[in-house]
Amino acid sequence: MQIVETRYHTFAEPPHELKLKSGVILGPITLAYETYGTLNKDKSNAIMVFHSLTGDAHAAFFHKGEEKPGWWDSMIGPGKGFDTDKYFVICSNVIGGCKGSTGPASVNPKTGKPFGLSFPFVTIDDMVAAQRHLIDHLGIKKLLCVSGGSMGGLQALIWATQYPEYVQSVIAIATNTRHTAQQIALHEVARQAIMGDPDWQGGDYYGKSIPARGLALARMIGHITYMSDKSMDEKFGRKLIAKERLGYDFSHDFEVENYLKYRSGNFVQRFDANSYLYILKSLDYFDMASEGKLTDVFARARAHFLVISFTSDWLYPSYQSKEMVRALKANDLDVSDIEINSSYGHDAFLVEVEGQTKLISHFLTRMQKGVSHAGK
């Protein structure tokens, strides 16, 4: 069992405050992050991995005293897709989050109280800009690869187009270049569930009762979108919970109902409702081609790309990845486009370990050889 500790980097003094896309200056900013593996002498083996909507910096290995590893432990470690015998892997919690990085639950130094809804709106671009300060702090001039699934993939794409000099390669998994009306609609239902909870209190619930019912409902909605019809049927079907008497008392009769209640109950204990609202909104505003053509945006990129999608992912469907691939290829970029046949829906990027491991291992080996040849 490999033990890892979360570390923290704070930048505060100008110019290390962050000017957000909204024009607001945010600082001091703290980023929680973890690292796995060893950075080589010329710092050429660094990979940054980005978490999805409700993830955090704890991507792999174990925290002391805990029995559950990081959220992508199946892919990060010795001999795994992101092989920590070869690579130095970094994962940070995004700003706006609630797992150690500056967000709505953080104390506003001007008031001495949690920000709540006074926390400024942050975009995916802002999250990446903060991460760049962390990479500079670590003394890394160029990342061998940036990678992530879902929201993590959005961050990888922003790295490639906003900071192309930092990025040699990109692995974008189950992701897209803009949020669709359907995705925004699903997020709005989740937001209304939270804001409709009396305990939300306009976002000022810190030190009081948290909006547990609304946040649990929002998470249930999310879990439904992460799975496919087939995966839910295979896992739960119409199985009933063993109980003495079935009836129309609106208790949980089916296993799928019990699953949603269990998962949402755990989530309420670990995630901040305001962070959920802020991050959902940052996703909704994400549109790489908002000011022009997607091909023009990707003209800034210089990286090699591996784009992975899944056949049953209806939240980030494969056709959206194909749009991205066409824009990349229009710029004569090196792109490998792989669609994996899977019944797991959007969750496939966390579950389809064997297929992704082969693809990612091969891709990273090719990228590292490119670095070696370039250095000769």
Image: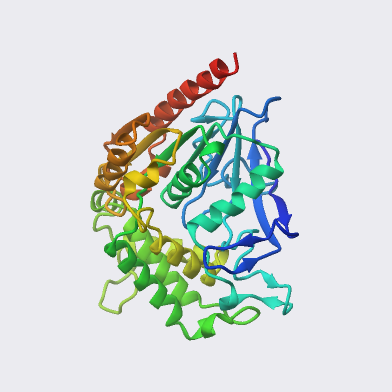
Find residue 274 and report its horizontal and vertical position in percent.
53, 72
- For the N terminus, the quadrant is top right
Q: Kindly identify the residue that appears in the image at 39 percent across and 63 percent down.
A: 284
Foreground pick, 265 / 48: 48
Q: Where is residue 272, by image quadrant?
A: bottom right
Find residue 262 and report its horizontal and vertical position in percent.
44, 63
Q: Is residue 279 left or right of residue 16?
A: left
In the displayed structure, 22 sits above or below 148; it is below
Find residue 356 and report its horizontal and vertical position in percent.
40, 33
* Residue 91 seen by the camera: yes
Q: Residue furthest top?
A: 376
Foreground pick, 144 / 24: 24
Q: Kindly identify the residue that appears in the image at 58 percent across and 41 percent down.
A: 60
Q: Kindly identify the residue that appears in the image at 64 percent across and 43 percent down.
A: 135
Foreground pick, 287 / 337: 287
Q: Kindly identify the residue that appears in the image at 60 percent across and 50 percent down.
A: 131
- For the C terminus, the quadrant is top right
In the displayed structure, 279 sits above or below 175; it is below
